[in-house]
Image (spheres, rainbow, N blue to C red):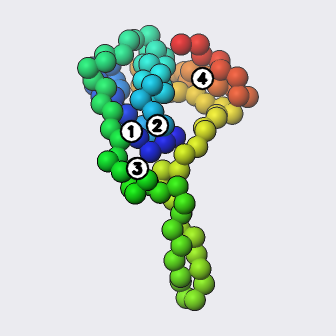
């Protein structure tokens, strides 16, 4: 997860979504793996990438402090940088009655 955004919209394939990412390369890799679950290929012309003009100002790394009822409170930050690891993950497709396991006990089950 990161401060930049990648968007992939291809309704004929059944995909429409945006994902917070650290960089463009990791975003394209993520979309490629998502589309591969259905046995399809990414149409590069449908990928949009955006990053804030001033990421440090839009999403600061250090959270803001404020005073509420005389006590200092640290506000939660927006879009913190994070490594996301799944212990278990499944996908359920509208065209199938069964779920497809993607990750089990932190091991990739589905190979794209």
Q: Nearer the viewer, residue 101 or 1?
A: 1
Residue 23 position within the rendered picture, expressed as x and y whole percent measured from the top left: 45, 33
- Badge 2 is on which residue? 21
Closer to the camera: disc 3 or disc 2? 3
Residue 30 position within the rendered picture, expressed as x and y whole percent measured from the top left: 48, 25
Q: Nearer the viewer, residue 36 or 61?
A: 61
103 left or right of 34? right
Q: Residue at x 44, y 45 (%)?
A: 3
Q: Residue at x 39, y 55 (%)?
A: 58
Sequence-wise first label, 3 or 2: 2
Spatial CA distance of label 1 from label 2 is 6 Å
Residue 100 position within the rendered picture, expressed as x and y whole percent measured from the top left: 56, 21
The image quadrant that residue 45 belongs to is top left
- Badge 3 is on which residue? 55
Q: Residue at x 46, y 15 (%)?
A: 36
Q: Nearer the viewer, residue 93 or 65?
A: 65
Tell me the number on the disc at residue 102: 4
Q: Secondary structure at mark 2?
A: strand
Tell me the number on the disc at residue 5: 1
Q: Are marks 4 and 2 in contact (CB under 8 Å)?
A: no
Spatial CA distance of label 1 from label 4 is 23 Å
Spatial CA distance of label 4 from label 2 is 20 Å
The image quadrant that residue 98 belongs to is top right
Sequence-wise first label, 4 or 2: 2
Residue with the most extreme right position? 105
């Amino acid at each position: 997860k990161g401060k930049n955004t990648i968007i992939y919209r291809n309704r004929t394939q059944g995909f429409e979504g945006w994902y917070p990412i650290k960089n463009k390369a990791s975003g394209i890799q993520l979309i490629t793996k998502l589309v591969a679950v259905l046995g399809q290929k990414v149409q590069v012309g449908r990928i949009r990438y955006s990053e804030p003009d001033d990421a440090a100002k839009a999403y600061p790394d250090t959270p803001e402090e404020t005073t509420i009822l005389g006590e200092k409170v640290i506000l939660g930050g927006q879009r913190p940088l994070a490594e996301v690891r799944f212990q278990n993950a499944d996908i359920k497709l509208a065209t199938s009655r069964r779920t497809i396991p993607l990750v089990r006990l932190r091991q990739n089950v589905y190979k794209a």
